Amino acid sequence: MKPVIGITMGDPAGIGPEIALKALKNREIQQSCIPVIIGDRISIEDANRLTGLGWKLNPVKQVGDAKGAYGTADYLDLSLLGEGPVDYGKVRADYGHAAFQYIVTAIGLALEKKLHAVVTGPICKESIFLAGHHFAGHTEIFSHYTGTKDYAMMLIAGNLRVIHVTTHLSLRDACEMIKKERVLKTIYLADKAMKMIGLTQYKIGVAGLNPHSSENGLFGDEEGREIIPAIRLAQQEGISVEGPIPPDTVFVKAMAGMYDVVVAMYHDQGHIPLKLSGFRMDPKSGRFTSVSGINTTIGLPIIRTSVDHGTAFDKAGKNIANAESMEDALRLAVTMATRQERETC
C-alpha cells in the first residue's frame, strides 16, 4: 500500500499552495505515495489557475478517500478563508490562524495513523503570532501537539546532513543551552535519524561551539566542560561519533564523506552550510535558481519533513516559485514512512 502523505499548504499569502501543486507534476512522487494537500479551496484553486497546471481538483471529506491519481490534486478543505481573492505577500492574522490550523489538523491525523507522514509548507511566524499562536516555528508546534520533549531539527541537502542542538534562540541564549545532557540527547537523535533513513553504517561528527573548538580552552571552555563529556558517553554506548571538530572544517569533511551527519551547536552554524550547499541564486535577477534541501524533525512519534525555505512573499502569486525543496521533502517522507511500515510489519 502506498503511504498517505499530508501536505500542509502553509501561509495562504506565500508560495506554499503553488509549490504543493507543482511538486505533484513529478510522476515519481505520485507513483510512490498518495499526497493530500491540507488547506483551503480558495488558495488551492488560485494556485491551480496561476500555475496553469490544470489539475483536476478533488476535495475529500477524509484523507482515506484520496486516490493519488496523476493529474488530480486531492485536498482536504478546512474552509478557514473567506471567498475574496488571495492577498499574496501580506502578513495577516487570519492567514496565520489558517496556516496554524492546517498544521494542527495534520498532526492529529498522523497521530490517528490516518497519515503516514506530514510534509509542511512554509509559514509566516509573524502572521501566526498575530493570530495569538506563540510558537517559534514548525518544530515547536509539532513538539507541543505530540507531547515530545526530546527532539531536534535535521536539515539535508545532497550528502550533507546537519542536526541541531539548539535552533530558534538568540545566540546568547543558545550558548547558555550548550550542556552535556542536551548535546548527548542530540547525538542520540542523530543516531536515530541515520537509522530512520536506512543507513546501517555511519559516522557522526560533532561541531565545536567556539573558534577552533576552543584550542584546549583558549577561546572558551564549553568544549571541555560540556561537549567532550557528551561525546565520550555516546562512544561508550557504541555510537560512532567524533569531535568536537572545529566548525570551520567539520562541514567540509562531511561534504567529503567523512561524516554522515554533523551535530551543530546552534541555528546558523548548521543552516549556513546547508543553504550554501543547496541554494543557488541568479545574481542579475536576485531569484533562486535552486532551492534543494529538506527540514525534518527527529524524535517525534510521527514523521514530519518540510521544505527548507520560507514563504517567499515577494514571489507569491507570480508562478515563479521553485518546487525542488518540496519534492525533496516528499521523497524523504516516503522513504521514512515506507521504512517505518516495514519495521512495524
Image (cartoon, helix red, strand yellow):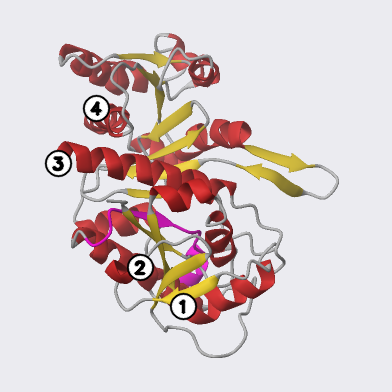
Q: Amino acid at mark 1?
A: Asp
- Bounds of the magenta span? 114-129
Q: Amino acid at mark 3?
A: Thr
176, above or below 69, in the image: above
Residue assigned mark 2: 66
Residue assigned mark 4: 184
Mark 1 Cα within 10 Å, few/some/many (few <14, many 20+)? many
Separation of marks 3 and 1 at Cα, in angstroms: 33 Å
Separation of marks 3 and 4 at Cα, in angstroms: 27 Å
Separation of marks 1 and 4 at Cα, in angstroms: 41 Å
The residue located at (42%, 64%) in the rendering is: 8
Q: Amino acid at mark 4?
A: Leu
Mark 3 Cα within 10 Å, few/some/many (few <14, many 20+)? few
Horizontal and vertical percent for residue 173? 39, 43
Horizontal and vertical percent for residue 219? 47, 17
Foreground disc of the pair 3, 1: 3
Q: Secondary structure at mark 2?
A: loop
Q: Quadrant of residue 132?
A: bottom left
Q: Secondary structure at mark 4?
A: helix
Residue 221 visible, this orientation: no
Residue farthest bottom in this picture: 83
